[in-house]
Image (cartoon, helix red, strand yellow):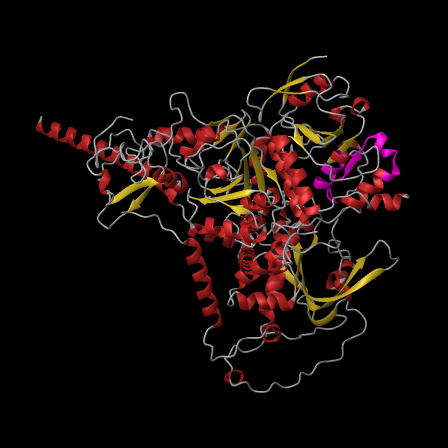
Amino acid sequence: MYVAVKGGEAAIANAHRLLADRRRGDRAVPALRLDQIVEQLALGVDRVMSEGSLYDRELAALAVVQARGDMIEAIFLVRAYRTTLPRFGYTNPVDSGAMQVERRISATYKDLPGGQVLGPTFDYTHRLLDPELAAGAEVETPAQRPVEPEAMPRVSAILAHEGLIEADGEMPLDHVPGDITREPLQFPMARDIRLQALSRGDEGFLLALGYSTQRGYARNHPFVGEIRIGEVELELDVPELPFAVPLGSIRVTECQMVNQFKGSAKAPPQFTRGYGLVFGQSERKAMAMALCDRALRAGELGEDVVAAAQDEEFVISHSDNVQATGFVEHLKLPHYVDFQAELGLVRRLRAEYEARENEDKVEEKKEAAE
Amino acid sequence: MNAQSTEIATYNFAYLDEQTKRMIRRAILKGIAIPGYQVPFASREMPMPYGWGTGGVQVTASIIGPDDVLKVIDQGADDTTNAVSIRAFFKKVAKVAVTTETAKATIIQTRHRIPEHPLNAGQVLVFQVPIPEPLRFLEPRETETRKMHALEEYGLMHVKLYEDIAKHGRIATTYAYPVKVEGRYVMDPSPTPKFDNPKMHRSPALQLFGAGREKRIYAVPPFTDVVSLDFEDHPFEVQTFDQPCALCGAANVYLDEVILDDHGGHMFVCSDTDHCEKRRADSTSPSWGGRAKGADGGNGQSSLSSTPTPARRADPRHKGEGKEAE
Amino acid sequence: MDIATQSIDGGFAEPVFNAQVVFRAIMDAMARPGAVQDVPQLTRPPAPLSATAAAAALSLCDNDTPVWLDPPLQAEASVKAWLGFHTGAPMANTPADAHFALIANPKEMAALDGFAQGTQEYPDRSTTLIFLVDDLASGPSLLLEGPGIEKTSMIAPPGMPRHFVEQWKQNNQRFPRGVDIILAAPGSLACLPRTTRIKTMEA
């Protein structure tokens, strides 16, 4: 006799125990410590902070190890924790011009005030696997030039002297920045909201879209005006105090793309900008974000919307990897009730189809016989 | 301030923080006041994936109190993995009593089914919704579908359904079958089989719908008209089954097809596990064992088993029993 | 007692559970228009704010919801301070900006259509009105029908706005736009969502 499957609770508990076992792996190998992940898998930790929208290296490291290195799972863990945290307030806008820069490059000028600073980059490394690293060789102390005490001007500010680049955003003075984690998304959206969504958007998705703009799907002639990585100060206004309270600093990557623009009915010929800003060190993400931001400004700049990267609803609705993975993976859940309904329909349609075919054959035979 | 023991002291009662609950509660009230209209809300990340019931979980978490009795079903069953997981979540974060009995629950969270047992006034049915927009597959843009709802412009939906009729001779939508609520909004009933649509019409229970990933909440108050879209010459009809449940003998319920072997042997049993168990426990049930048709007696009226697939039942009590008209 | 002390006292003793109880009463009332839901006395607000109206405000309002007060409430600094302390809600400058409006004297209130009605695309962006009423039975009877009501239901709040039946009919006609009303009486409340039609009113 058929007995409905029972014991779902026990099965789930057992699956989770097995997961914990596999996560730990061979007990003869020392368990990873969070500080090891923070220090030695720093860029992975940065990605989790950035797309998890929570700046906490230790929690991100915990998420990485708990997720067995699955980045989207780790991002999800961080998001689900973040959402339970109370909101104390909003910091003042960070001033990336005052950043304590560790890396800063511009592709639009050979040299510029503050200089080109390569910093800790993979660029120009030859991608040869390093056996010495596997052997745990000691690493040399790095040589760095002393940090310049005065701020490095942003390239956009340099170009602005000539009036050939659009100014910083045209937001009205009383515009209160939105918060995609507190308000439902609404299309079309203001650029501040869009940038928030892009900043937590999936690196791979934005990378592919940014790449598509370079290959002619909404080409926007980008130049890297500047990429800078470093520490920026966070300050919070407290109503009871006459000054902003410093909260510490965070590491961010900022990319300003400078895009050639021949002008449209809406805007004069000038350089336009695409902007990327993410937690931690992630040039690829910041650059992809800047390309997408510029593409998504098509409407504002009077360009024709012809490609996926310019389509705000398409890009923003599908850029969140926590949402995307959930919905794709939900196909694993039982759907047998709906499948049963479809099965019934297909069986019925099929029976009708075969009945018609048979009728036709009978007709043909009849005709042949006549 | 909060009611949790030290074990999970960092989480509020029912997981969500109070500000989030208030935001969701406001959306629920607006949903009730505008039946069938999708209220945008700032859906939160939940500790289960988007697409796995986060909308329903947020709605339940926002309405549930310590005195509630919660039932969670998925595909009509209390023991499917996701139902087990969500029930365990609320047991843990809200410490509420849980039940599998439809009649005893004050809140029933569901995915893909409406219980067979009629619901009462005072019960709340919370649906998990993947894609709340009934027009989404006809028009992918939110900006456009919102306009259509605003202008009550539902021609596209009727065209789609009518194309089905032209092509297949019938409306080829079997689940998530669109309904019109109180004569105004076209609404997605969530991916329940259309068999369940009539249960929504003037139900005494409050029906709440949560779509977490798509960030929408909507509602059907009790005693509200919910009419499945159809045409005069092609009236709406629900699935029927040739045979009753092979386990409890219930007719006029939604059945799952259970595969018994790899030679096409299968049987049909209640999708609503609580309903089935109740009937089997109640041996005086008049339907028990008496209503089955012949094993391969398709009568051709059914949309679900009109192809004469021989149903070989494992339960010997049903074998070769007499036919009886429905 | 000075305003500062007054504004701190009298909130929910158990914010999480009290808010849930009050919300469920409002939800059930909104889902069953005209049905009276009991609400225990959970707040002690400064007059003329009533305990039931205050409980509704505490369970629904916060920083995200501008609140409008009618002149009798507006006139009491202690009411503003109390609501500000317990909800954090900003005061709406005009009725049309309000997510919620607390009305101590519905009889003298401005027209319903002066409050936010929502838009055709977003009819949810409307004001929810919370009327302070003495009871739900001593006024002219309102015979109600619509979603949430099996056949008809009856409610009789005293001191309702002038030309209320006519105003409410217009509110119905604006559907899906329109306002919803929470009637807050001592120890109980009832709701009139925008879908509820008033069939007749006996004077």
Residue closer to the observer: C146 or C92: C146
Q: Is residue A78 visible?
A: yes
Q: Which residues are magenta?
A: C53-78
* Percent coordinates x, y for residue B292 in the rendering: 26, 34
Residue located farthest toward the left when viewing the structure as drawn: A369
Residue closer to the observer: A115 or B122: B122
- Residue placed at 86% from the left, 59% from the top? A243
Residue closer to the observer: A18 or A97: A18
* Percent coordinates x, y for residue C197 in the rendering: 63, 20
* Percent coordinates x, y for residue C8 in the rendering: 82, 46
* Percent coordinates x, y for residue B152 in the rendering: 56, 27
Q: Quadrant of residue B64?
A: top right
Give the side of residue B181 with respect to residue B193, left or right.
right
Q: Is residue A280 above or below residue C33?
A: below
Q: Is residue B116 above or below residue B17?
A: above
| Residue C77 belongs to magenta span | yes
Image quadrant in which the C terminus of chain B is located? top left
Give the side of residue C109 with respect to residue B132, left or right.
right
Q: How many marks?
A: 0
Q: Quadrant of residue A18?
A: bottom left
| Residue B112 belongs to magenta span | no
Residue located farthest toward the top when viewing the structure as drawn: C203
Residue located farthest toward the front when viewing the structure as drawn: B284
Q: Is residue A265 visible?
A: no
Q: Is residue C20 above or below residue A121?
A: above
